[in-house]
């Protein structure tokens, strides 16, 4: 059974690129959301195997959405990887304090992204 | 932090691993090109075009400091049309006779700063790339990327491929 990955990004271009990369892996299925609020709603409905989420988004940013997900019992253990253009150490630490499992910088590299997903989801 | 040292699983020999990494590198390039082409095709107005350029630059190229100059019909000067992420105001108008890199871009050349060509300049500001574009208002323009995100060390051949999509 395919592993469900919830992709969250307000950038249609980034979302499309990430989806194209992830779909190359036969074992992954993608769901998408455009902001933090929509991500929580979708995650509660489908209970994904992993969430890959941008940080800077309208409505609710990635840090806030990650914190909110950690308060939901069904989502507490779902791996959350934050994606961002900001690689500064304090920014990364803020991400981990929000409850994320990992962090990856934009622009996304397919090898790095797939290796990271595989480390959480396996083959 | 991202697990940059993570192994690509399911790979045994070096040649096989090299082959997989090559195909993943190709995948990155192709996915970026398709996403950019799709995004640019959807643009209708100048405002949408500028937003698309900002979004692509930040998410797929690695620059959050950029500007667009409009080239006047006589090809004698460029006027600042839009800037994003800059700490200071860029020159509003620049005479092309005094701007080698801007003039080359206005004439249709893609200018990228690298070890061979050295630093590119717009006024007193150093720039990473100057890309000729066609503005949706009908004028020729030049997209200028000033600095790159800290994790993006330099522009490369795959970025050049993306810039070519901007030029059409």
Image: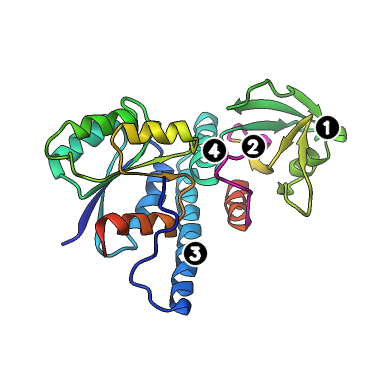
Q: Position of residue A118 (x, y in %)?
A: 31, 59
- The front one of B82 and B71 is B82
Instruction: Using residue A5 as the reference point, say whether residue A20 is left or right of it.
Output: right
- Expressed as whole percent of the image width and height from the top left, the position of residue B8 reads 38, 65
Alpha-carbon span between mark 3 and mark 1? 41 Å
- What's the distance in space between the residues labelled 1 and 2, CA to CA? 26 Å
Q: Which mark is residue B26?
A: 3
Label 3 chain ID: B
Which quarter of the figure has residue B143?
top right
Query: Which residue was labeled with disc 1?
Result: B76
The residue located at (63%, 50%) in the rendering is: B155
Write the residue at 52% across / 38% down: B58
Which element carries disc 3, helix, strand or loop? Answer: helix
Looking at the image, is B18 positioned above or below residue A24? below
Dot 4: few (<14), some (14–19), or many (≥20) neighbours within 10 Å?
A: some
Residue B114 visible in the picture: yes
Q: Nearer the viewer, mark 1 or mark 2?
A: 2
Tell me which segment is drawn in magenta: B136-156
Q: Nearer the viewer, residue A46 or B149?
A: B149
Q: Residues within 10 Å of mark 1 (few under 14, many from 20)?
A: some
Left or right: residue B127 versus residue A86 is right
Tell me if I can see residue A21 in this picture.
no
Marked residue nearer the N-terminal end (1 or 4): 4
Q: Looking at the image, which is closer to me, B12 or B27? A: B12
User: In terms of sequence position, does the residue under pointer 2 or pointer 4 come before the other?
Assistant: 4
Residue of label 4: B53
Q: Which residue is mark 2?
A: B147
Callout 2: chain: B
Report how far apart the C-alphas of labels 2 and 4 lie in the structure.
15 Å
Looking at marks 4 and 3 on the same chain, the residue that comes earlier in the sequence is marked by 3
């Amino acid at each position: 059974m395919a592993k469900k990955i919830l992709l969250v990004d307000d950038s249609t271009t980034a979302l499309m690129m990430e989806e194209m990369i992830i779909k190359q892996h036969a074992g992954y299925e993608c769901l998408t959301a455009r902001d933090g609020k929509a991500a929580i709603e979708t995650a509660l409905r489908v209970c994904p195997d992993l969430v890959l989420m941008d940080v800077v988004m309208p409505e609710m940013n990635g840090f806030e959405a990650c914190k909110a997900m950690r308060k939901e019992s069904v989502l507490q253990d779902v791996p959350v990887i934050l994606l961002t253009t900001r690689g500064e150490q304090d920014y990364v630490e803020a991400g981990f304090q929000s409850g994320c499992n990992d962090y990856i910088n934009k622009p996304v590299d397919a090898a790095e992204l797939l290796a990271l997903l595989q480390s959480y989801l396996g083959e | 932090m991202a697990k940059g040292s993570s192994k690509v699983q399911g790979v045994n020999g070096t040649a096989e691993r090299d082959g997989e990494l090559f195909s993943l590198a190709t995948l990155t390039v192709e996915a970026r090109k398709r996403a950019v082409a799709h995004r640019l095709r959807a643009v209708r107005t100048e405002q949408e075009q500028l937003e698309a350029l900002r979004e692509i630059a930040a998410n797929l190229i690695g620059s959050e400091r950029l500007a667009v100059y409009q080239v006047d019909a006589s090809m004698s000067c460029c006027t600042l049309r839009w800037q994003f992420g800059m700490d200071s105001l860029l020159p509003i108008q620049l005479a092309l006779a005094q701007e080698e890199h801007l003039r080359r871009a206005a004439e249709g050349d893609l200018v990228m700063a690298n070890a061979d060509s050295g630093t590119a300049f717009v006024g007193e500001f150093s720039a990473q790339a100057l890309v000729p574009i066609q503005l949706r208002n009908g004028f020729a323009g030049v997209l200028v990327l000033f600095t790159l995100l800290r994790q993006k060390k330099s522009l490369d051949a795959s970025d050049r491929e993306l810039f070519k999509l901007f030029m059409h």
